[in-house]
Amino acid sequence: MSQSKTQDEGKENIYDTAKCRLLRKYKLSESDKLFLFRFEDPEIATNWRFKPGQFVEVSLLGLGEVPISICSSARRMGFFELCIRNAGRVTSQIHKLQPGSLVGIRGPYGNGFPMEQFYNRDLLLVAAGLGMAPLRSVFLYAIDNRWLFGNITIINSAKFGNELLFKRELEAMKDIATAEDISIVQTATRDPDFKGLHGRATSHFEKVNVDPKNCAVAMCGPPAMYKGMFEELIARGYDPRYIFVTLERRMKCGVGKCGHCNIGTATSWKYACKDGPVFDYYAITSIPGLI
Amino acid sequence: MRYVKISKQNTYEFLERLKKIGTLYAPHKISEKFFDFCEVDDVKDVMFEYQRTIRPPRRFFYPEREVLFTFDTRKVELYENLPSDKKQILFGVHSCDIVALRTMDSKFIDDQPDPYYKSRRENGIVIGLSCLPDEYCFCNVRRVEFVDAGFDLFFHELPDGFLVRVGTVVGHKLVDPYEGELFEEVCPDDTENMSKFEEKRTSMFTTQGNWDNLRYFMELRLNHPMYIRESEKCLGCGNCTLTCPSCKCYDVQDIPSIDGRTGERIRFWDSCQFRSHGLVAGDHNFRETKQDRFHNRYQCKNSYCSATTTSFCVGCGRCTYFCPADIQFKKNLMEIAGYKGGYS
């Protein structure tokens, strides 16, 4: 694709894709699967980098492209993972792919979480539903660079227990982590039969082991959750400069051209794909229509 | 800046010679009421006085529909389908449309340039033409009624020809071969006449002043009743966005061949007024109602383009002129901002 070839040619087609082979797929829930991809071109596979919170456009020729958050660690190179929900025309076909199949990938796109700003701080990660996908990338990044971060709390929530993404992985990590410096909270909001914690993320603050004054917060979930969490976080003394959320929009092109993911108002007109999808507290609270 | 003069008669000869450089497009009268940029066959058909073309000039650099790639589904490969290097010359572009092209440039030729648009822009020659406004025009309050950049040549109407501003090296190269033959020196009378033309033009606008604070009032009055009243009239046809010189939303679709082995990845103009614009998988729509979409366009068009330091709306009047529901964009914006004076 473009990235290696084009530099020699001095030309680059931003819409061109690179071939990726599906190596493994795992079932995460009834509707979500985890896909492990590797670039066919060894040069791209070695040099391709991304930041937690960024996304790629997955292309199935003849069907089209879909934007998907990368959910693997940015520090584990040579492959990447995508958690994909069977929700639409393209994703339903991706779910049918067998290992060995080829897809087209372009990206990574979006600003991603500003991980450098998070260094030397505690981390509070709050995910709801599919929001766990981009936050897994943040979480694994922090685990892979453990010395750069303080205490970590991750709250993974879903309506039902069997919809909790990466539930077993997070449970397994509990054993690896030192009990005091990593807190893993998994909760179901509407599942009385779930054998675990119940209620929304906001009702489990007693399990949060971070210092609000020196903590970075990353959230991914529905806009309603952000509103509730913002109030809760500010009331508990979290620094608004270090509260970040990621937004979902129809990110068709990924490069700020096609206009579908536009958000905001006249003085703050944004494209979620290029100006976002990660926005800070002040952007969210000052620009109408973001959440 | 270099200034030259050309007589009306020599202008026809100049157009004739432009046809040898590339495909020449200029405004033509295509029906009783409408004008459009058409390929020039007989230079005598070129219209020097027109208010607005039905289709905006952006289509020459960013066509309504184009094949981005062809593909092979078995090899999983895309094959670029870049535009040819043929020169396109646009004659008779008004200042509003020139600024609109520059707003498009700011998005399509940024740090991740669109190769299709960029290539056509690089192979394009833009020749501006002065105009007199009608009641739909409000480029003056948008501060784009007189352009400084974005044209290779700009023709200003004089009683006996045109005063031509040369904007780029490409413009110099167009004038050089005909200096003394078709183009002559500008004399003080010509400058005087241009001055008079500009004075007349300025007085003809039905709105005066500037709308620099408009976007702030739009935010302070997000829930203005105008949005409800006017969006109820809206048919959601998308005419306003398709005729807009600065709208750039597009959609992309894969069209497979009948056997599914090959196909084309095409892109085509989309409109934020269509329900599908904000629709994502799972049937969730980020702009669910017609009012949401109507509001979205008003915010987008009035947002700030840092490259031109203007809004994306250039006040060409197309969205109102071609609206089948007679929704008055200019009037509605004045209502939101509380501008009273100057509107007739």
Image (cartoon, grey):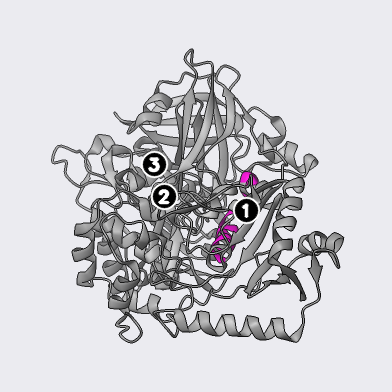
Query: Where's residue B317, x and y in %?
Result: 41, 65
Residue drawn at (76%, 46%), measured in percent from left and top?
A: B20
Query: Where's residue B235, x and y in %?
Result: 25, 51
Q: Magenta residues?
A: B99-116
Q: Nearer the viewer, residue A189 or B105?
A: B105
Query: What's the chain of the residue with tag 1?
Result: B
Which residue lies under the disc numbered 2?
Answer: A260
Cα distance between the residues tagged 2 and 3: 35 Å
Which residue lies under the disc numbered 1?
Answer: B44
Q: Is residue A153 within the magenta segment?
A: no
Which residue lies under the disc numbered 3?
Answer: A170
The correct choice, above or below, for B307 with respect to A112 in the image is: below
Magenta: main secondary structure: helix
Mark 1 residue type: Lys
Is residue A282 toward the left or the right of residue A118 in the image?
Answer: left
Dots 1, 3 in contact, CB < 8 A:
no
Residue drawn at (31%, 73%), measured in percent from left and top?
A: B331
Is residue B44 toward the left or the right of residue B7 in the image?
Answer: left
The label nearer to you, 2 versus 1, is 1
Residue drawn at (38%, 72%), measured in percent from left and top?
A: B135
The correct choice, above or below, for A127 with respect to B329 in the image is: above
Query: What's the chain of the residue with tag 3?
Result: A
Dots 2, 3 in contact, CB < 8 A:
no
Query: What's the chain of the residue with tag 2?
Result: A
Cα distance between the residues tagged 2 and 1: 42 Å
Callout 2: SS: loop
Residue under disc 1 on the same chain as residue under disc 3: no
Mark 3 residue type: Leu
Q: Is residue B218 visible?
A: yes
